[in-house]
């Protein structure tokens, strides 16, 4: 094993042996090189005041070489903020601004010890880093039965982890914290579990309330006290889009110092929050009372980044940073939030009107981009195809009964026609 990896492992084992035990085989082996092209280039940047012939970019007239046809469309930005490589951890200014944003939006973090967010190539990349660092073949990854299908690819297919599902809702149509607790305790013989908490939930658009949030935290604490090392991952892709009296903070804050056997990891990003899906700017953040633990995990994370994408795209990081720093940012974001909230409320009004009686029920939703119908007597895939073929409408079929509808990409004025058409498709198939 590389001495740098060994040194990081010894730090983790000394500072918190439980966190060291959470690492996968790859997680133990990975490290960020202290010597080599990046470190020598960094040294040259500070000392080479005559010629710097180190890193693989081209320069011209004292700045990064670039094509006029590209720069003409980006003339508001300095070429140095676009064309050169971003650091593997991301633009330092962006990391700082995002951390301040996290603290503002999550007051529960005020007295907690957590690291500086590391820039990822959006949310999927952040989850992939978690999988690489912590998931070995057979390790349990615990998610609800209503989940984003990419978890299976990221943790199951890529890393060979065992996907363990529990029902998202209990008999009262609230978050099934007891189901989560039982799924966790079932891993006692393994001594380790990875839990992914995705709120607002994709596909249902559900976020638990404060009491449910406390129950989730208690379930994870119970598992830790039973001797299970828990990697608790908050997938906060749709953070901030809370339309009712649900949790309005990430559970990352409550998990940050929960128990020595719990490692809290926050994966979030500008992707959905700031409506910049194609920019691919996300973040991964670790919490620990030990600075040494956070530093070791961050170094291993940089090793994964260096070994896969090397570093994230610089232009999109600059665009996000400038937006976050703009005095108009908050007002513009609030405007978009109100549009999304009105759409969600309109959907709920339509569904509660009684006009679709007998065709479906719907899963509770209060946030995010989506909601999910539970079809009563028709197959979801058949309805999906009928909608496409007869009405030119696209939806997502999930399993036998569930149909996901994205109100995020449907104008409020068109929602009535959308759901009336779904109802007609159901009726067509019942004739």
Image (cartoon, helix red, strand yellow):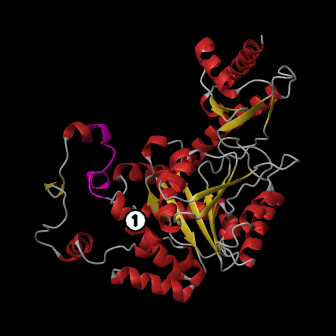
Q: Residue shown at 33%/80% (left/top)?
A: 2
Magenta span of residues: 71-85
- The secondary element bearing badge 1 is classed as helix
Residue 146, position as x, y percentages in the image: 69, 45
Q: Is residue 327 visible?
A: no
- Asked if the magenta segment contains residue 73, the reply would be yes
Is 57 displayed left or right of 24 in the figure?
A: left
- Residue on which disc 1 sits: 304
Q: Residue shown at 50%/69% (left/top)?
A: 116
Residue 184, position as x, y percentages in the image: 72, 65
- Asked if the magenta segment contains residue 154, the reply would be no
Pick the quarter of the image with the N terminus.
Answer: bottom left
Q: State whether residue 360 is above or below residue 331.
A: above
Q: State whether residue 193 is above or below residue 43.
A: above
Q: Residue shown at 56%/74% (left/top)?
A: 22
Pick the quarter of the image with the C terminus.
Answer: top right
Is 404 displayed left or right of 324 in the figure?
A: right
Residue 253, position as x, y percentages in the image: 67, 67
Question: Dot 1 surroundings within 10 Å: few (below 14), some, or many (20 or more)?
Answer: many
């Amino acid at each position: 094993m590389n001495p740098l990896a060994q040194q990081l492992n010894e730090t983790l084992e000394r500072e918190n042996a439980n966190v060291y035990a959470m690492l996968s085989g790859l997680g133990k082996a990975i490290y960020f090189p202290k010597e080599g092209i990046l470190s020598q280039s960094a040294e040259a940047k500070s000392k080479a005041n005559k010629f710097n012939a180190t890193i693989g970019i081209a320069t011209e007239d004292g700045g990064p070489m670039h094509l006029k046809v590209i720069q003409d469309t980006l003339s508001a930005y300095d070429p140095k903020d676009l064309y050169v490589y971003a650091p593997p951890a991301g633009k330092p200014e962006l990391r700082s601004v995002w951390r301040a944003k996290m603290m503002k939006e999550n007051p529960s973090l005020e007295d907690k010890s957590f690291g500086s967010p590391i820039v990822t190539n959006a949310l999927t990349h952040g989850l992939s880093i978690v999988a690489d660092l912590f998931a070995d073949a057979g390790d349990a990854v615990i998610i609800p039965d209503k989940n984003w299908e990419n978890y299976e690819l990221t943790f199951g297919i890529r890393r060979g982890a065992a996907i363990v599902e529990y029902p998202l809702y209990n008999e009262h149509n609230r978050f099934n914290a007891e189901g989560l607790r039982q799924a966790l305790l079932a891993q006692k013989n393994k001594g380790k579990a990875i839990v992914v908490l995705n709120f607002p939930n994709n596909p249902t658009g559900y976020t638990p309330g404060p009491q449910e949030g406390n129950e989730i935290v208690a379930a994870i604490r119970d598992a830790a006290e039973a001797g299970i090392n828990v990697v608790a991952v908050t997938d906060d892709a749709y953070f901030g889009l809370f339309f009712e009296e649900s949790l309005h903070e990430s559970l990352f804050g409550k998990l940050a110092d929960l128990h020595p056997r719990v490692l809290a990891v926050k994966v979030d990003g500008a992707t959905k929050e700031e409506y910049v899906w194609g920019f691919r700017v996300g973040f991964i953040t670790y919490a620990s009372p030990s600075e040494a633990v956070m530093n070791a995990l961050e170094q291993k994370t940089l090793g994964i980044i260096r070994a896969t994408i090397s570093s994230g795209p610089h232009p999109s990081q600059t665009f996000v940073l400038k937006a976050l720093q703009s005095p108009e940012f908050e007002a513009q974001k609030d405007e978009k939030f109100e549009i999304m909230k009105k759409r969600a409320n309109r959907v709920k009004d339509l569904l509660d009107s009684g006009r679709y009686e007998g065709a479906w029920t719907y899963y509770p939703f209060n946030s995010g981009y989506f909601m999910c119908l539970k079809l009563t007597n028709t197959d979801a895939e058949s309805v999906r195809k009928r909608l496409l073929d007869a009405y030119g409408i696209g939806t997502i079929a999930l399993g036998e009964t569930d149909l996901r509808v994205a109100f995020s990409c449907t104008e409020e004025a068109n929602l009535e026609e959308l759901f009336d058409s779904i109802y007609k498709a159901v009726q067509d198939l019942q004739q």
